[in-house]
Image (tube, rainbow, N blue to C red):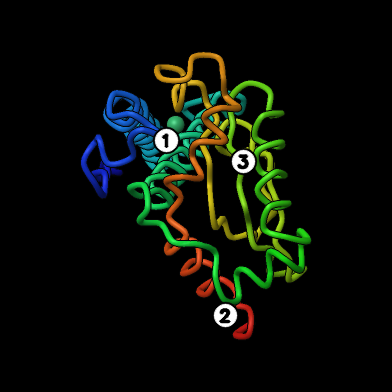
Amino acid sequence: MAKLRPLPYPYDALGPAIDARTVKVHHDKHQAGYVKGYNKTLKRIEASQRHRVETSGPKLIPEMLKARYQNLTFNAAGIVLHEMYWENLTSPGQGGEPTGRLLSQIEQDFGTSPVFLHEMIDVGSAIHGSGWVVLAWVPRFERLTILAVGQHQNGWIPGAVPLLVIDVWEHAYYLQYESSRLDYLKAIWGVMNWHAVNERFAHASSARSGG
Ligand code: MN3
């Protein structure tokens, strides 16, 4: 069973870019909802498995079983992404900058750091409905790319390692920014935790030499 991981800082730590009310509702209601959804769905899947063990027949029609697993994927991806999202953010002035190998890789794959920033903002603003804009390292191609993720689980490259994730679901910004997702996408860079992103890239890019 999954547990709701506590925030790594107080609710008001990300203000004014993301206010305390938004952080509280996002973590305590929405993220908690994915944890509840995951646990509930996992219980149902386990019940179906037990049923097969005990009766050697299926409890659910295939369509329903597929829906259960898809629901598990949705909630699992939601949990992981929210934990990364909070880790990716920190109080204003605390986050540092992209440095070292991450900075060189950004320059190699995007041209310059400002170009990268604009591309993230543009892609994030263009996502229809609910999703995430993600900077990911793709070991197979030894390249950074931007993923436009639908909901939590759609649009990933197998093996890609997310380095920086930005939630663009309305619940991430609507209380504070109402319909202006673009203003949220511009403001969030003021609380970006580049120390965490640098570290994640160092870890992800060194793993490739092992394989
Ligand atoms: Mn969210």
Q: Is residue 156 left or right of residue 176?
A: right
Q: Which quadrant of the rendered structure holds the N terminus?
A: top left
Ligand 1 within 8 Å of the CB at mark 1: no
- The residue at 34%/25% (across/down) is 22
The amino acid type, in three-letter code, at marker 2 is Ser
Q: Residues within 10 Å of mark 3 (few under 14, many from 20)?
A: many
Q: First in sequence: mark 1 or mark 2?
A: 1
Q: x, y percentage for residue 162? A: 56, 55
Mark 2–mark 3 distance (CA, rounded to whole Å): 24 Å
Residue 207 rendering spot, x and y as whole percentages: 56, 78
Could you tell me residue 72's position as x and y percent? 47, 36
Distance from the alpha carbon under mark 1 to that under mark 2: 37 Å
Q: Quadrant of ligand 1?
A: top left
Q: Residues within 10 Å of mark 2 (few under 14, many from 20)?
A: few
Mark 3 lies on a secondary structure that is strand
| Mark carried by residue 45 | 1
Task: Please state which of residues 194 and 203 is positioned toward the viewer in this rendering.
Answer: 194
Disc 3 marks a residue whose amino acid type is: Val
Up/down of 55 relative to 134, above or below? above
Q: CA distance from mark 1 to mark 3?
A: 30 Å
Pointer 2 or 3: first along the chain: 3
Tag 1: amino acid: Ile
Q: Which mark is residue 133?
A: 3
**Residue 40 makes an appearance in the image:** no
Q: Which mark is residue 206?
A: 2
- Relative to 1, is 142 above or below? below
